[in-house]
Amino acid sequence: MMDKESEWEIVRWLWSLQRKGRWRMSIGGEDGCIGTLALSWSFAGFRKTEKLRMVHRTLAHCLQDPMETVFPKTKIPKCSKEEKKLLQKAAARSRRQERKRSLEDFLHYESINISDYYFENGLRKVFPYHFMFKAYVKRRWIDRPIHEVLLDEFNFPFPDIIHARCDSGDLRVNDECISPDYLLRDSDMISHKVHRHEMPVLDSPIDFIHEDDDLLVINKPASIPVHPCGQYTLNSLTHILARQYDRRPLRFTHRLDRMTSGLMIIAKNYDASLRLATEISAREVKKYYICRVDGHFPDEVEDSPSTLPQGVIACTQPLGPLCSKMGLHAVVSESSGGKPACTHFKRLLYDPDTNTSLVVCRLFTGRTHQIRIHLQYLGYPITDDPLYNSSDWGDRKGKGAQYGVPVDEVIRRISAHRSKDSYLDFVHGTESSISGFDRLRDHLNSTRSALDKEVRDRLLQSFDSTCPECIRFYKDPDMKCLVLQLHAYRYEGADWSYTASLPSWATSLASHTSDFPALIQSCISALG
């Protein structure tokens, strides 16, 4: 046991850090002079060894006793380098937590008023706007020409655009003009001014399931990404909740894929987000999904464990990225970098008219596209899944992770079908001798004449003659590229449970089923 003087030396040192603004400490339940930090969180790092656990206990004991608020100046306590390092890490962690706790808004809300929405054909769209992207150079970009990095990682349509952006000064490094052959260096800041054309999402209302001072629970519509990403900023859930429903700032502790609908639990403050994130990471939250798959989903498969309840099928194939640039994942062995994944399934009902089944799924891990890939592996992919229910994966559509063609060929096929060019309206395409502005005006007056005149005028005002996207006219996306028939139905914690109402594709399939909610509950009970 550490002697009393050593105990107090540590306490004095921590107190001196607090006085310098480098620490937060609570004494006997009363706030210190700068703020409060629960001791059990502050010293979590000490629990790695028995000796450090002892330090944690003795410090907790010391802080229960009355003590003077000012200590004589002392040197750093006598402890090993490992203990000192852990103290410094704990102090840094507490500072980060206090910054997060006191944060009243987030940087991604800065662009919230950069443009406005308009609505067309049941879709929420955004008027094009100018935006400055900024990013520090990543390690894998160092010593590579900037034009090569932009073509490889940012899907620039033409190399000529990079040359033009460098000449105009829209593409800079460290706020200085550069050539396309500039070799990127460590700590370089790339800034790129672009004319953004966001992708449309469904104009669906967001259903509020529960709200209190700590949590907001919603039913997320399909087609809307949770966070600003790629070609979605204002058309993200973050910004729609802020602009249309005046809910900000929000702290998202989990997410759903863009095309997935269903339950989302969102924290309103740091402490609530910490509690929820801790429950999720500890796998104390039960997550149930409902999906529609092709074929008659079976009651058992060959390699499913016999210990499972009747009708429950498990898939435990490890998952990993197949092409990070495209966000494409697949069954990947753990020796090749795949991570363990586990999903349990149970058939809810089968519809012979459409040869499709409704299936209840329980997630035990949270890998990217986990349910979609595991169902593909079992041979029952989600109906109309544009990514994992495609012959691009071979004649078996990826069943059993057998593609029949090299993986590079699978990636090439999927990449070709996911190109925005497949949505080009070639009737009003770029092959014309008239100016881009006149071409846009003609397009709006003919093809999109149903729009209000104010909307058409605003679209004309947003035209940028240097932007290649302004003269490329796209058709609206197909519904199967907006809605995935996968729905987050219920999340359960130790003392709470929330359920999201089902989408139309699920209720329509169950229209002839009596007492459908009871049938769902029986499947959930079987899944545990």
Image (spheres, rainbow, N blue to C red):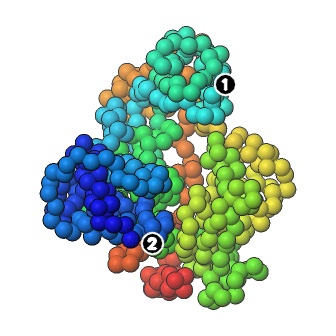
For mark 2, give the secondary structure.
loop
**Image point (40%, 36%), residue name:** 126
Which kind of residue does numbered mark 2 sit on?
Val
Q: Is residue 520 visible?
A: yes
Which kind of residue does numbered mark 1 sit on?
Arg
The percent position of residue 252, horizontal first and vertical second, equals 39, 55
For disc 1, the marked residue is 144
Q: Is residue 217 visible?
A: no
Discs 2, 1 touching: Cβ within 8 Å: no
Q: Residues within 10 Å of mark 2 (few under 14, many from 20)?
A: many
Q: Nearer the viewer, residue 454 or 501?
A: 501
Res 112 → quadrant: top left
For disc 2, the marked residue is 285
**Image point (65%, 77%), residue name:** 314
Q: Residues within 10 Å of mark 1 (few under 14, many from 20)?
A: some
**Image point (75%, 79%), residue name:** 303
Counting residues from the N terminus, which is met first, the one under dot 2 or under dot 1? 1
Q: Is residue 160 left or right of residue 42?
A: right
